[in-house]
Amino acid sequence: MDPGEKILSLEQMDQWVAAEKSGGRRIGFTCGSFDLLHAGHVQYLGAARELCDRLIVAVNSDASVSRYKSPLRPIVPERERMYVVAGLAAVDAVTLMEEDRPLSLLLRWKPDLYIKGGDYAEASLRSADAVKEYGGKVAVVKSGFETSSSRIMERIGVLGAHGAPDIASSRGSRGLVLLDRDGTLIRNVPFLHDPAKVEILPGVIDGLLKLQAAELRLAIVTNQQGIGLGYYTVQDFIAVNQRLLRELGARGVRISKIYFCPHSLGERCSCRKPATGMITRAMREFGVAPSLTFLVGDSDDDMQAGADAGCQTVRVDEKGFGSAAEQILSLRGT
């Protein structure tokens, strides 16, 4: 069976629940983000299914996960998360939950059991009273595994920080180049959020390859006030970066990290250029001194931020990025 056949709209679920109830079957309901499906999820969904005849799983939408977990989540898009959950034998039907809480869905279908997994206490479930009022019951299934999506992400981050050792060499990194994004690497499109509109500027790839060949690390530092203003989301910003990194990677360019400020001009923060927050953080995390750090940008704010952080600054002008790259190599004595 194609797991996609288990994924139902709210209206389809209305009909499915009615048919199952008319057949005398006991309906269980649970919900969650299921961002990175792990052993704890599988164990608790299996245990939940043993408590009922049919199990509904409501998967939080992308917008919902971003609200109650982090603007950087989810990792996996909602449609894919639903498909993976539907692939489990313990799950009979899957639907999307746009709201952060399941109360409206519980009242809509009135399942016999509202089931949650993890370390919840029944008394802490805010929808429990409403379930009991219509005659349903609440059950909490404890996980047999000490794991979570957050712990998996943390471990991935730790593993990612431990790169395989390079072959021993007497030559080390010769410095760090911090790159503005819009107007420096790609054409400046106001409030860019469409990956299809990413256009790498002339001379950028050749210039970056020369800097990389000179053993300079490359990172991006970019203001993105469109996020704070609500014009686009963090996920939109990441999608644009994915397009950029894919095109650069295909030509052999490696961007080590992307730092961004999501705040609007009206918000007070230490990261939005001309403030130095992103730059000082990058130098700290890369372990590179200001004297070996170059800030490349196309605006007065870029130049001020770099200068205030003690870096050497290079402005991209009408001569393009290639000229800026040559300036860095000249300053570095390469």
Image (cartoon, rainbow, N blue to C red):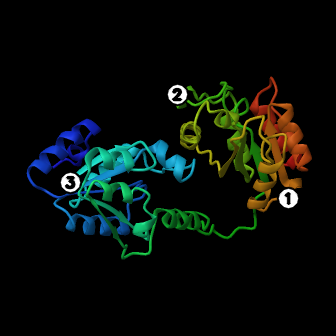
Of circles 3 and 2, which is in front?
3
Q: Which residue is mark 3?
A: 92
- Residue ID at (13%, 56%): 25
Label 1: how many Cα within 10 Å (few below 14, some 14–19, many 20+): some
Q: Which residue is mark 2?
A: 196
Residue displayed at 33% across by 46% down: 105
How far from the left and from the top, in percent, is residue 51?
22, 67
**Regarding mark 3 in the picture, which secondary structure is present there?**
loop
x and y percentages locating residue 91 in the rendered image: 24, 57
Residue 122 visible in the snapshot: yes
Looking at numbered disc 3 in the image, what kind of residue is underneath it? Asp
Q: Residues within 10 Å of mark 2 (few under 14, many from 20)?
A: few
Whichever of labels 1 and 3 marks the residue nearer the N terminus, that label is 3
**Given this view, does label 1 or label 3 mark the residue nearer the observer?**
3
**Closer to viewer: mark 2 or mark 1:** 2
The amino acid type, in three-letter code, at marker 1 is: Ala
Q: Position of residue 96 (x, y in %)?
A: 35, 44
- Residue found farthest to the left: 23
Residue under the point 71% across and 67% down: 169
The residue at which mark 1 appears reads as 289
Asked where in the image residue 154 lies, by quadrant, the reply is: bottom right
Distance from label 3 to label 2 (Cα)? Answer: 38 Å
SS for tag 1?
loop
Q: Position of residue 34 (x, y in %)?
A: 39, 56
Q: CA distance from mark 1 to mark 3?
A: 57 Å
Q: CA distance from mark 2 to mark 1?
A: 37 Å
Judged from the image, the secondary structure of the residue bearing numbered disc 2 is helix
Task: Answer with mark 2 or mark 1, whichever residue precedes in sequence.
Answer: 2
Residue closest to the eye, 231 or 142: 142
Is the Cβ of the residue at disc 2 closer than 8 Å to that at disc 1?
no
